[in-house]
């Protein structure tokens, strides 16, 4: 497939956000966006704006919580952090993601071999 | 659980909108600032940095929009927005709003009001547990082929005891009581019920206990009674201590043992007996014939059964039919040689019929089903016409809003979004109309019940229950969708570009649009005309009925009934009481004549008696039972029925003198042809060995006896003095002035003669005749009302369309006039299309009415289904109204000043 800069799959963004917060602790929206861009080495094309509805969705489900704080350069910013049930969700989703990728790898590998 | 919490959070989001919007703004601004700073660190100048940040971030407004959708409840928020907008629009055009709501209120109200009657009369069940298990036991009469429902007591016993398909079988029979308590007596509706009556129905007492099998064992030995809740409230002021006390029924002390629950009315809707006594008391309350409970040939009670749940109605019928024939065969055996082969064969040809008993004995249903459904379809059509009208109104209004609509479309509103908003608007209107309609429905229902004879409407509550309210809701929803759809349909034909073009009413404009509106006009005319024709048919029929030659003079006759036999008086006392009363009434001021009869004319009741006629041999199945009445001297003078020949009864026709009768003309012709009947004899004794012994002393002109619409009946009259037993009698008094005024004087005389003798059914002959026309009158009134309403709506719609088209075509008309068209040409031009539409609608309407009027059949009296008067009258009326409705706005077209019109725009 020619498309190397992947579109973000629905649900994948949720997992990425959860993982980011798990790795770095409480972060504001900009921080999350920067981190995603760094890690994906710009492979992932992300309109940073789409982060915000996703953050709200995760918060409504109770997986992350938010509170207002002050950023490094003295700006008021909303900080998001992972909740206990968010951590559980992350584990569960990671596991299912791994199962899925393993399956896809096996499937595609065999298909190529044949 | 989770989804509930999310919903709650979103709901919160709706209400904290402003605060949350602020927070989101701040959050996004922080993000943008951070992005821009980062970009500047990489060496961009500020403007470039901001541009790049915006690119990286994506659309800010889109983000906000999708964030808001995620945060709140977009469906409801849009709805709230639409509702606000709709209400604003409605407030802005109060005239339109008022007309719409009023139209809907009338339409929905009339439908809901009728539905409340249908709901209780056609859909209502007996208020007892598991009513679907109940069945009414009937049998077909071999001679008439019709279903009969009267059984003898021995037959009932056999059905009850020998069947294998029923849990229980009850029987009941009506009876009238003269009830006294605390020095006051009055007439009460009674019912004699079998001991298992309440057990079979599954009714629990409200107070005390109900009649049980132990109260129904020995004839005449169970002086107990159960009162209905309503009677207990009305007569005893809900005094619980009445239970255990004695009341006097027809001169017998009877102990009240309990009260039935408030909602229970018995086994027949709209007939709610006040007092119930055990069936075994029939020997006391209906002493004649004395062998009432033993005679298998005396059929006088109706039977209702509760079937075993596992047995279907068909199975039960098959099983019961076998049993019924065994019983019949046994009865015939007992009668032995007394029955001839023909009668025997006929008796055995009878078959059992079972009907669903969930409504009990559904006499009211049978009587009212057709008129109710007919009127319901009429109101349904009126609502449709109203819908078409409102659709037309909305179309006209949207045509004025065209500019607004085009702008909305151009700046990106989707069609679905616009339609959704319009539907919200029409649903708001229809909901408001529905609410007002419920009020109208309540009035309508009350008015409808007022049209019914009092004895029928008294127990018919037709409550506005949940089912009725749901009906109102659904019908307003349906109407809202129906008339709201019209603008939506039209929108799908409008292109943005076309719509945005300056709204120039050019010569060809609006033709497509016009066709939807034309279709609505056509529809309205086609629907209204059959209603008008129906109204015409009923009007004609009612006029025929009112004009019927009754054969008697109905004006100035007062009627009242009394029944001293109920008080247990011996025959001599009853006789002298009647004689005394008649003598006293005759001396009252303003009384021109007075007399007694056993059956008063057009009261709906009648007696028939089988006769033998000297020198006349009837065929095997010939009906030789003319109507009969027992009367006092002066009867024919009171009613103004003339004699053809012979004389009236006199005081000299006594019990010891020769027996005499008077017959009517039809009877004279039937039995004697052209021979003179005077001096011939007829007999009424059952025993074939007794020779006819009553001499015909007079022949009177025919009259109407039971209904105004009846064919001539054979009728004979026997004198009171020669009748062995007298029961109830109707007093009829011809007065010189207002007959109602004599009522109190008569009542005082009765009271003076006997304190415990209630006078009942007091009325005048004119009112009695009017009551007999209640159904006809109701149908006539309602169909006229709704026919006119539909016509009015249709003509308003027509008027609106013509006015609209004239307004749009002002310029075209101006050009035509400038080119020399005369006002007449213009008028013709504007109206001709409407004329064609109306004519087409009328043609379809006439065809539909012709097809449907056959269904009215028996509801009409001496009016054919294709009654030319009704058809022509309705077409004429609709034509004139439509012409007026089109002409008035079209006249404006002829006044168009070409100069002004061409300068216009």
Image (cartoon, coloured by chain):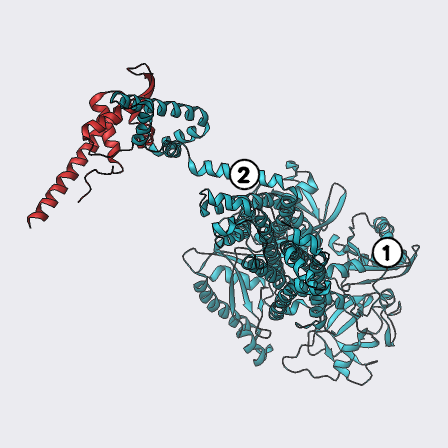
Chain colours: A red, B cyan
- Residue A48 visible? The answer is no
- Are circles 2 and 1 on residues that touch, CB within 8 Å? no
Is any part of residue B402 visible from this angle? yes
Residue B94 picture location, percent across and down: 64, 41
Nearer mark to the viewer, of 2 and 1: 2
In the rendered image, the vertical position of residue B824 relative to residue A61, given as above or below: below
Q: What's the residue at 29%, 33% (across, down)?
A: A47
Chain bearing mark 2: B
Vertical relation: B659 (above or below) B387: below
Mark closest to the chain's N terminus, 2 or 1:
2
Viewer-closest of B476 and B757: B476
Q: Which quadrant is home to the N terminus of chain B?
A: top left
**Residue at (56%, 76%) from the top-left corner?**
B346
**Which residue is label 1 attached to?**
B739
Crowd tier of the residue under label 2, counting other residues whose Cα lies within 10 Å: few below 14, some 14–19, many 20 or above: some
Does residue A66 appear left or right of residue B879 in this picture? Answer: left
Above/below status of B375 relative to B423: below
């Amino acid at each position: 497939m020619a498309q190397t800069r992947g579109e973000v799959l629905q649900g994948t963004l949720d997992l990425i956000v959860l993982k980011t917060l798990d790795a770095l602790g409480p972060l504001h929206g900009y921080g999350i966006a920067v981190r995603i861009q760094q890690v994906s080495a710009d492979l992932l094309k992300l309109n940073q704006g789409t982060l915000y509805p996703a953050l709200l969705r995760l918060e409504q489900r109770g997986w992350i919580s938010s509170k207002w704080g002050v950023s490094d350069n003295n700006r008021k910013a909303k900080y998001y952090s992972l909740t206990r049930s968010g951590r559980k969700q992350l584990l569960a989703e990671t596991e299912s993601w791994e199962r899925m990728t393993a399956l896809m790898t096996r499937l595609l590998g065999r298909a190529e071999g044949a | 659980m989770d989804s509930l919490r999310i919903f709650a959070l979103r709901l919160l989001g709706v209400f904290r909108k402003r605060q949350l919007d602020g927070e989101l703004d701040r959050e996004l601004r922080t993000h943008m600032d951070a992005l821009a700073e980062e970009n500047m660190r990489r060496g961009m100048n500020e403007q470039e940095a901001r541009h790049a940040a915006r690119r990286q971030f994506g659309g800010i407004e889109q983000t906000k929009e999708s964030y808001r959708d995620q945060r709140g409840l977009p469906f409801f928020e849009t709805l709230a927005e639409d509702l606000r907008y709709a209400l604003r629009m409605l407030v802005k055009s109060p005239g339109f709003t008022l007309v719409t709501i009023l139209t809907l209120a009338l339409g929905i109200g009339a439908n809901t009001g009728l539905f409340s009657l249908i709901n209780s009369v056609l859909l209502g069940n007996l208020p007892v547990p598991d009513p679907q298990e109940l069945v009414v036991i009937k049998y077909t009469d071999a001679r008439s082929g019709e279903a009969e429902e009267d059984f003898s007591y021995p037959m009932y016993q056999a059905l009850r005891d020998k069947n294998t398909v029923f849990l229980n079988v009850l029987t009941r029979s009506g009876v009238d009581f003269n009830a006294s308590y605390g020095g006051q007596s009055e007439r009460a509706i009674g019912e004699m019920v079998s001991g298992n009556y309440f057990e079979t129905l599954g009714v629990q007492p409200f107070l005390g206990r109900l009649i049980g099998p132990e109260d129904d064992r020995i004839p005449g030995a169970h002086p107990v009674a159960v009162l209905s809740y309503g009677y207990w409230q009305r007569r005893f002021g809900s005094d619980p201590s009445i239970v255990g006390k004695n009341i006097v029924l027809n001169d017998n002390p009877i102990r009240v043992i309990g009260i039935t629950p408030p909602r229970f009315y018995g086994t027949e809707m709209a007939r709610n007996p006040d007092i119930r006594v055990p069936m075994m008391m029939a020997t006391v309350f209906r002493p004649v014939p004395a062998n009432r409970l033993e005679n298998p040939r005396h059929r006088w009670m109706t039977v209702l059964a509760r079937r075993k749940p596992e047995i279907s109605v068909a199975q039960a019928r098959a099983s019961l039919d076998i049993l019924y024939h065994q019983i019949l065969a046994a009865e015939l055996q007992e009668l032995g040689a007394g029955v001839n082969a023909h009668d025997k064969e006929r008796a055995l040809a009878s078959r059992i019929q079972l009907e669903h008993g969930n409504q009990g004995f559904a006499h009211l249903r049978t009587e009212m089903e057709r008129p109710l459904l007919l009127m319901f379809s009429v109101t349904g059509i009126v609502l449709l016409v109203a819908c078409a009208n409102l659709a037309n109104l909305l179309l006209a209004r949207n045509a004025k809003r065209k500019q607004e609509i085009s702008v909305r479309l151009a700046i990106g509103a989707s069609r679905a979004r616009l339609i959704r908003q319009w539907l919200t608007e029409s649903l708001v209107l229809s909901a408001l109309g529905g609410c007002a309609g419920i009020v109208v429905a309540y009035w309508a229902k009350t008015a409808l019940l007022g049209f019914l004879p009092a004895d029928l409407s008294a127990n018919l509550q037709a409550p506005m229950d949940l089912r009725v309210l749901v009906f109102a809701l659904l019908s307003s929803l349906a109407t809202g969708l129906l008339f709201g759809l019209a603008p939506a349909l039209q929108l799908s034909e409008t292109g943005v570009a076309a719509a945005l073009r300056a709204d120039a009413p050019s010569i060809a404009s609006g033709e497509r649009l016009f066709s939807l509106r034309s279709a609505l006009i056509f529809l309205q005319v086609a629907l209204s005309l059959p209603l008008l024709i129906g109204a015409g048919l009923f009007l004609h029929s009612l006029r025929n009925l009112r004009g019927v030659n009754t054969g008697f003079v109905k004006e100035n006759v007062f009627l009242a009934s009394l029944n001293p036999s109920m008080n247990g008086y011996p025959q001599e006392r009853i006789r002298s009481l009647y004689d005394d009363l008649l003598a006293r009434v005759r001396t009252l001021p303003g009384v021109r004549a007075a007399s007694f009869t056993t059956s008063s004319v057009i009261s709906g009741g009648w007696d028939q008696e089988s006769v033998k006629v000297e020198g006349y041999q009837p065929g095997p199945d010939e009906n030789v039972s003319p109507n009969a009445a027992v009367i006092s001297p002066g009867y024919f003078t009171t009613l103004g029925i003339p004699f053809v020949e012979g004389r009236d009864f006199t005081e000299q026709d006594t019990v010891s003198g020769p027996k005499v009768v008077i017959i009517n003309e039809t009877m004279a012709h039937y039995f004697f042809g052209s021979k003179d009947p005077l001096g011939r004899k007829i007999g009424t004794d059952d025993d074939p060995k007794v020779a006819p012994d009553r001499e015909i002393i007079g022949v009177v002109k025919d009259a109407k006896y039971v209904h105004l619409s009846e064919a001539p009946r054979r009728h004979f009259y026997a004198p009171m003095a020669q009748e062995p037993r007298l029961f109830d009698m109707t007093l009829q008094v011809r007065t010189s002035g207002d007959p109602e005024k004599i009522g109190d004087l008569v009542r005082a005389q009765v009271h003076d003669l006997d304190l415990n003798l209630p006078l009942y059914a007091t009325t005048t002959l004119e009112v009695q005749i009017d009551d007999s026309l209640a159904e006809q009158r109701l149908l006539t009134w309602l169909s006229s009302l709704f026919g006119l309403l539909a016509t009015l709506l249709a003509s308003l719609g027509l008027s609106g369309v013509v006015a609209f088209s004239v307004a749009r075509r002002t310029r075209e008309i101006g050009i035509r006039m400038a080119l020399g068209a005369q006002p007449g040409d213009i008028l013709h031009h504007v109206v001709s299309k409407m004329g064609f539409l109306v004519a087409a609608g009328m043609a379809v309407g006439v065809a539909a009415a012709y097809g449907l009027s056959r269904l009215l059949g028996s509801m009409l009296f001496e009016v054919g289904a294709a009654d030319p008067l009704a058809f022509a009258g309705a077409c004429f009326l609709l034509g004139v109204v439509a012409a007026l409705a089109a002409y008035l706005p079209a006249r404006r077209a002829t006044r168009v000043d070409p100069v002004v019109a061409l300068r216009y725009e």
